């Protein structure tokens, strides 16, 4: 992706003609604005390209919206704020020009994260510019109006000079604690402290070193956790998961993103029995694992727990050199960055990840697909490999060949397609 910067050649040439000439030139010819880091589609995600409301998205009819809990931005930008409102949650059977005939499926109390510039409630999107804000699912938290439940979320704003390497600039915790007049964040590190509270909504803006693992928000007798929820007993009763050694979690097996966005990796950690934990593929920003929304310039950190690891029953051994997996995914169609990447890089729609945790004596793994052949080297701690492809493989197979340290080879064939 090309990045352009402002050039001062014309102004320098004008200076040679005299200070007066340069002053006139600078006044009459405004400097061009820098190109956005990424293109951003600001159309309503809940609408189709022809403007009709999409039946595949939840629609909201908003009432009594107000801006609350303003907090100054530590970097001096537009203030952070929340917008609270009551809403009818609607469902459509088919695309429609209006919501008049939509079926009401719920009545909610909602809080939405945003920024305020003047009297405008908006957001600083991935292009680095402030735009008025509509309904954005990633910034929205709702609960049933009649039986409200506590809601809380942590996110990390990004700067995106280079889409392949965005940087975390802060942290923000927001949500709903119905009936409360005060709220405190604890256990998060940088985000710990009292939150701004108004209309039952709370907001805490802090530095980038916060983390959701073990973090809680308390107020008015309510406590809500920000970290991962435990797996259901129907899974934990059938599988055994490793216990992690605190402080050893990291991300290994870096793989480039085919679209030019943040790279991919595998979260790993050492375990108390001397082995290694290995989770599934994730995006990586500033060395942290999580999800990335380039359109909104937000990062959502994930926490590696023992229950997120591969079960002990699937750990590689002397007979089975690697435990491999295949993941299918897709990207949001409204992401203008991905749309441009598909055009410029000739990418196919969809995504395929091939990943594996291997035994310690595996020195390299050959991955053969209908598209190419790759040789990957297992990482140092988790002994994991990762390959990321654009497009969906609708047929064929992937062949993995693990080469062990003493010359032996282990092979496995996995089917591709749906």
Image (cartoon, helix red, strand yellow):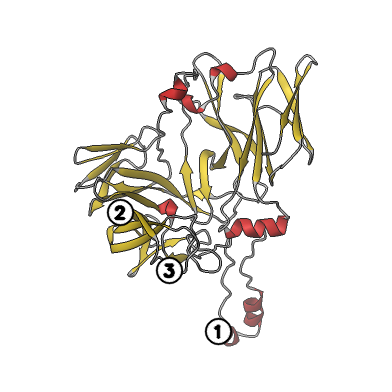
Instruction: Name the residue rendered at 80%, 16% in the picture.
Output: 407
Looking at the picture, tell me which residue is in the foreground, 342 or 38.
Answer: 342
Q: What is the crowding at mark 2: few (fewer than 14 residues within 10 Å), some, or many (at least 20)?
A: some
Left or right, 200 with reference to 132: left
Tell me the quarter of the image containing the N terminus. Answer: bottom right
Q: What is the crowding at mark 1: few (fewer than 14 residues within 10 Å), some, or many (at least 20)?
A: few
Secondary element type, mark 2: strand
Q: What is the number of the mark on residue 23?
A: 1
Spatial separation of the CA atoms under disc 1 and disc 2: 60 Å
Left or right, 194 with reference to 376: left
Secondary element type, mark 1: helix
Spatial separation of the CA atoms under disc 3 and disc 1: 54 Å
Of marks 3 and 1, the one in the foreground: 3
Q: What is the number of the mark on residue 107?
A: 2
Residue 393 screen position, x and y as percent: 71, 42
Label whose residue precedes the other's in the sequence (1 or 2): 1
Tell me the quarter of the image containing the C terminus. Answer: top right
Left or right, 125 with reference to 80: right
Left or right, 149 with reference to 229: left
Instruction: Specify the quadrant of the image occupied by residue 101.
Output: bottom left
Residue 354 screen position, x and y as percent: 67, 34
Decide if residue 229 is in sight here. Answer: yes
Residue 305 screen position, x and y as percent: 46, 27
Spatial separation of the CA atoms under disc 2 and disc 3: 19 Å
Instruction: Name the residue rendered at 44%, 51% in the picture.
Output: 138
How many badges with numbers are in the image? 3
Circles 3 and 1: CB atoms closer than 8 Å? no
Instruction: Name the residue rendered at 35%, 42% in the picture.
Output: 191
Which residue bears the numbered disc 3? 98
Please determine whether, in this image, residue 356 is positioned above or below residue 301.
above
């Amino acid at each position: 992706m090309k990045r352009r910067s402002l050039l001062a050649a014309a102004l320098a040439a004008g200076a040679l003609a005299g200070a007066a000439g340069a002053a006139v030139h600078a006044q009459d010819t405004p400097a061009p604005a820098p190109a956005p880091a990424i293109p951003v589609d600001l159309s309503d995600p809940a609408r189709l390209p022809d403007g009709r409301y999409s039946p595949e998205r939840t629609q909201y009819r908003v009432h009594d919206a107000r801006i609350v809990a303003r907090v100054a931005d530590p970097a001096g930008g537009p203030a952070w704020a929340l917008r609270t409102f009551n809403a009818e949650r609607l469902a459509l059977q088919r695309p429609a020009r209006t919501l008049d005939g939509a079926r009401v499926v719920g009545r909610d109390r909602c809080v939405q994260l945003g920024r305020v510039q003047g009297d405008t409630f908006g957001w600083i999107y991935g292009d680095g510019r402030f735009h008025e804000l509509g309904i954005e699912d990633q910034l929205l938290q709702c609960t049933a109006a009649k039986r409200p439940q506590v809601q809380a979320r942590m996110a990390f704003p990004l700067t995106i000079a280079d889409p392949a390497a965005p940087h975390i600039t802060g942290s923000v915790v927001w949500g709903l604690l119905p009936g409360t007049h005060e709220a405190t964040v604890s256990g998060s590190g940088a985000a710990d402290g009292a939150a701004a509270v108004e209309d039952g909504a709370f907001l805490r803006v802090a530095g980038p070193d916060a983390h959701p693992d073990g973090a809680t928000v308390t107020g008015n007798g309510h406590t809500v956790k920000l970290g991962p929820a435990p797996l259901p007993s129907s899974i934990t009763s059938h599988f055994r998961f490793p216990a992690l050694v605190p402080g050893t979690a990291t991300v290994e097996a870096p793989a480039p993103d085919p679209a030019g966005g943040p790279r991919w990796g595998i979260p790993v950690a050492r375990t108390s029995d001397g082995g290694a934990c290995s989770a599934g593929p994730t995006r990586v920003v500033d060395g942290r694992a999580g999800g990335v929304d380039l359109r909104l310039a937000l990062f959502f950190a994930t926490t590696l727990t023992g229950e997120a690891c591969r079960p002990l029953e699937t750990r590689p051994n002397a007979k089975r050199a690697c435990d491999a997996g295949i993941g299918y995914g897709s990207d949001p169609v409204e992401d203008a960055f991905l749309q441009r990447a598909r055009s410029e890089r000739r990418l196919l729609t969809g995504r395929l990840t091939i990943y594996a945790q291997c035994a310690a004596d595996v020195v390299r793994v050959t991955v053969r697909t209908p598209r190419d052949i790759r040789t990957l080297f297992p990482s140092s701690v988790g002994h994991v490999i990762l390959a990321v492809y654009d497009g969906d493989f609708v047929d064929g197979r992937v062949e993995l060949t693990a080469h062990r340290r003493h010359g032996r080879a282990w092979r496995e064939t996995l089917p591709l397609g749906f």
